[in-house]
Every structure is written in structure tokens, then in C-alpha cells.
Amino acid sequence: MTLPTATPRDTWRWVRGQLRARPWEVSGTVAVGLVGAGAAIVPVSALGVLVDRVRAGAAPSTIVGIGAVIGVAALVAGLTGGLAAYLVARTGGRLLATLREATVERALRLPTATLERAGRGDLLARVGPDVAAVHRVVAEILPTMISSVLLAVLSLVTMAGIDWRLGLAGAVSLPLYVLGLRWYLPRSAPGYREQRVAIADRARLLVESMLGRATVHAYRLEDRHLRGIDVASARARDVEYSVFKLFTRLVGRVNRAELFGVAAIVVAGFYLVRAGAVTVGETAAAAVLFHRLFNPIGGLLFSAADIQAAGAALARLVGVVGVPSAGEVAGAPVEGPVELALSGVHYAYDDGEDVLHGVSLTVPAGARVALVGATGAGKSTLAAIAAGLLRPASGTVTVGGMPPGPPHVAIVTQETHVFAGPLVEDLRLARPAATVSETAAALGTVGALTWAAALPEGLATVVGEGGHPLTAAQAQQLALARVVLADPAVAILDEATAEAGSLGARDLEESALAATAGRTTLIVAHRLTQAAAADLIVVLDGGRVAESGTHAALVAADGAYARLWRAWETR
């Protein structure tokens, strides 16, 4: 399963909406383009006048005035043409930047289940190769395409102004161009869509194989993954070959259209000159005008491959923007300790069997509840549903009577990412307006200020990839400090101390207690010492609540939790 792709109608609706939001920018660009196209036609018309004056025996000095006109027109055409190309590229670049930002913003807010089903490769292909494909057209092809269209329209109008029959002769080629495109586009469009999907599949396999290389090596799956990558690469190659073969056949149709157009103008001009309807110079100007259209029109048609690919890529980007985000189900922020309630929650991954079977759980306002159970019992799934990252197949989840999700719920997992950059900026991800003293106070709350202040440049030290490395325990304390800065009403810790190791686990447990003090807290407890310190313990078994109670009560009951506790003490 991949993320959705927008329909052509939805894609064009998005582009049209963006253009309407920039009326002065668009109209100014079109106006400059028209001036440039008009100035490009003046030298050809002047050339026709020169031919007629030479045939009439005009003085050699005639060429000076006409040459001056041609020179000035060429200068204006060059300046306005360059300016028009810049304006088109700037407008297109801004639209692409808006789309890229909207795509990334929506991707960051997508439900976890949606991203897991789609795979990282599909999303990476959209914000990587797809953006690059659109950018190439916007920066290199779109300016030429718009100027070509304007030049073609004004050239045909000028030819018709000389004599309507010359304009009609030049227009003879238009149906041939249209027929060529009507033959090409319906055949190539599905191919380019398939090409983008094939590239995304290849990227997905490559990314997943590299990210999971340890597992691949452990289970000797190298050959299987390589075969999968070979198949995906072969598919991408075959699709690209098929669309290129269609493109070469389009080239032949374009050449035939050019031949018929020139022949029609020359033949019509011959008879019109004989009849005295037009001059030789006017016929020559019409022929040169049409011939000058070969490169822009040909370039426009020959760029159809890139335009088709960019159109498919654009539809994939707009498709991401249209996906509902996880945050759209969340309500207004809530303040202070609130109750977290789950009622009759069922959940299954990818239409498989339920991993949660009607789980009901209440975390009173300000209380700390621990989830324990064997691996696969459904603890992390329940925590993700409580955080609003997953949506239950049935049942309800509320936080103070509101749907769960940011900004009133924060979750910390055992897989904590340290972003590249200064440590203080990493902390400010939770609250961008936080001051240095506030970030230092958050670190102090979780017991991390001592080591943070001892870094080479203190809180300004660059951490993450390429920077100062942090231990697993330090990274978890950083994540807990973000919780302090974000100040959510509900905190969810999903095995947040599991990666600390036995030596640092106790310190990290104390950091977690400090970060969640006074907050409604749900803990997926990897270490039973965390569970023992909770106000209430809930034992999950096979996606169901097996028992619940305080630590003392559950140990006295000698049930599932008591067995886990005895095993923990004697480990």
C-alpha cells in the first residue's frame, strides 16, 4: 500500500487555487511575457520590409534604419524574455515551495498506521525524486514552455495580419500537432504514473533493506532482498523504456507537422505573390515566423516526457496534502490534570486479527497507571491509541472529554531521535519560544543539566548526526525534558527506560517520575520497578485486561502480575 495520488482534477484545482492567490504576480508575469514575445516578432517583420525595399531598389542606407529597429527589438526581446523566464521560475518555485512545505507538514502529522502501511520509501520518493522532477520542469522547462506558447500565438496572429490566407496556411500544422499529442498523451500518461510508482517501490525496497540491514544479516535474507531490488529495478527500467519508445514516435509526428506547415506557407505565398495580394517580403516574413516556431514548439512537445513525469509527481505530492492528519481529530487544548479514558477499544493491523479486544481503561486525573504484560500483549498498541497516533477500529478514547492528540498529549518511546543541531534548539522543538533559561530548567528537572552544561559548548553544543554523540540514557533524558517544556496534560511513556541499560535505568526512572509529576501518566513498563511505583497497574494478556490493582494488591492476589514480579526479583 502506498500513500494516495491526487486525481488530475484535484491536482489542477490545487494549482489553480495557488495561482488565484497570486493575481498580481501572475498577471505581471504574463504581461512581461507578451511584451517579450511581441518584441521577438518585430525583427522578422522588419526583415520582410527589408526584402521588399531591396527588391524595389531602395538606397543602401535603408538598411541602417531597419537594422536599428531590429537591434532595439532584439535587445527588448532579450531583456523581457529573460525577465519573463525569471518571473515564471520564481512563481513556479514559490508554488513548489508551498507544496513541499505542505507535504512535509502533512507527512509529519500523518497517523502512524498510515505511514507504516505506506512504508518510508514511498514518502521519501515523494519528497525526494518527485520534488526534483517537478522542480526541473518549473526551473528549466516551464519558462520556455510559456514563452513558446505566447510566441506561437502572436506569430500566428501576425501571419494572419499580413494575409488571413497565410495565417490559415500556418495553422494547417496545428491539427497535426494536436493529433500527435492526442495519440501520445493517453498512451504515455499511464506509463509515467507507473514509472513514478516503480521508482517509489525501488526506493522503498532500498531504504527498508538498508534500515533493516542488521535483521537482514541476522536471518541471511541478503539474497531475497537483492532479488526484490533487482525485480523492482527491472520494472522501473522496462517502464522507462516503453515510455521513451512512445516519445520517439512522437518526434516523427512533430517533424511531419513542421513539413506540412512550411510547405503550406510556401505554396500559399507563391500563389498570393503571383496574384499581387502579398509581397515577397511579407511571404518571407511569414515563412521565417513559422520556421522560428520549430524550436519552441518542438521543445514544448519534446518536453512532454518531462512534463508528464512532473505532472505525475505533482499529483503524488498533492495526494499527500489531501490525506487527513492525526491532529485533525484532536480538539482544543486542555489544561491541568485530566482523565484519560479508553472504552471498548478494538484494534487490528492491516485487516488482520484483533490485537486488542474491547480494552477499557481509565487513568484518573493526575494519576500514574502502568501497563505490564508479555511481549505481544498489546501494550504499545494501546499506548499509541491513547496518544492519538492510532485510531481504534471500535471503541472510544478521550482526554478530558476531548479526542486524544497534540497538543494535550505527549508520548515518549524507547526509540528517541536526537536531531542534528544545537542542544538548545533540539529542546525547543517542544516549545519554540522557550528561553535558554527555561530549557536549562527543563534539563534540570529531569536531572540532565549537569552533563548538558559539561558539554564543550554547553547548551549550544551541536548534537545528533555529525555532532557530539549522546548516550541512550542522555537521549531519553532529552526527550523527557521536551515533555517538561511542552507541558502536556497527559504523558505517555512507552518503555522509555528500556534502552538505558541496567546501570542508568534507575536514574532514568527518576527522570521520568520528575517529568511526569502532576500529570496524568500512562506507562508501558519494561522494568517492573516502574510499575511498582505507579498508582495502578493494569496487566494485559493477549490484548485483554487480565487484572488490575495496586502493586501490593496484585502481589497478594498471586496472579499473572505476581508471577512476573517473582521472575523480576530472581532474574
Image (cartoon, rainbow, N blue to C red):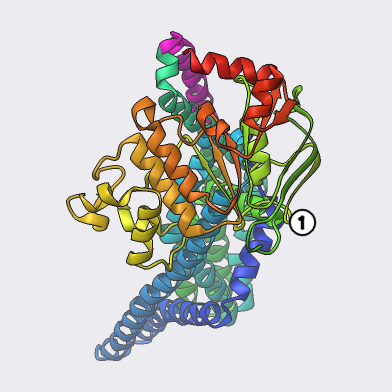
Residue at 52 percent of width and 49 percent of height: 516
Residue linked to disc 1: 401
| In the image: residue 58, left or right of residue 207 | left
**Quadrant including the N terminus:** top right
Magenta range is: 218-246
- Write the residue at 51% across / 19% down: 231
Does the magenta portion include 244?
yes
* Position in image of residue 238 (x %, y %): 52, 26
Look at the numbered disc 1 and give the secondary structure of its residue.
loop
Which residue is rendered at x = 57% and y = 46% of the image? 253
Q: Is residue 470 above or below residue 51?
A: above
Identified by mark 1, the residue type is Gly
Res 377 visible: no
Majority secondary structure of the magenta segment? helix
Q: Does the magenta-highlighted stretch encompass residue 447?
A: no
As rendered, which of 180 and 268 lies closer to the eye?
A: 180
On the rendered structure, is 351 left or right of 510? right
Q: Image check: 149 left or right of 295?
A: right
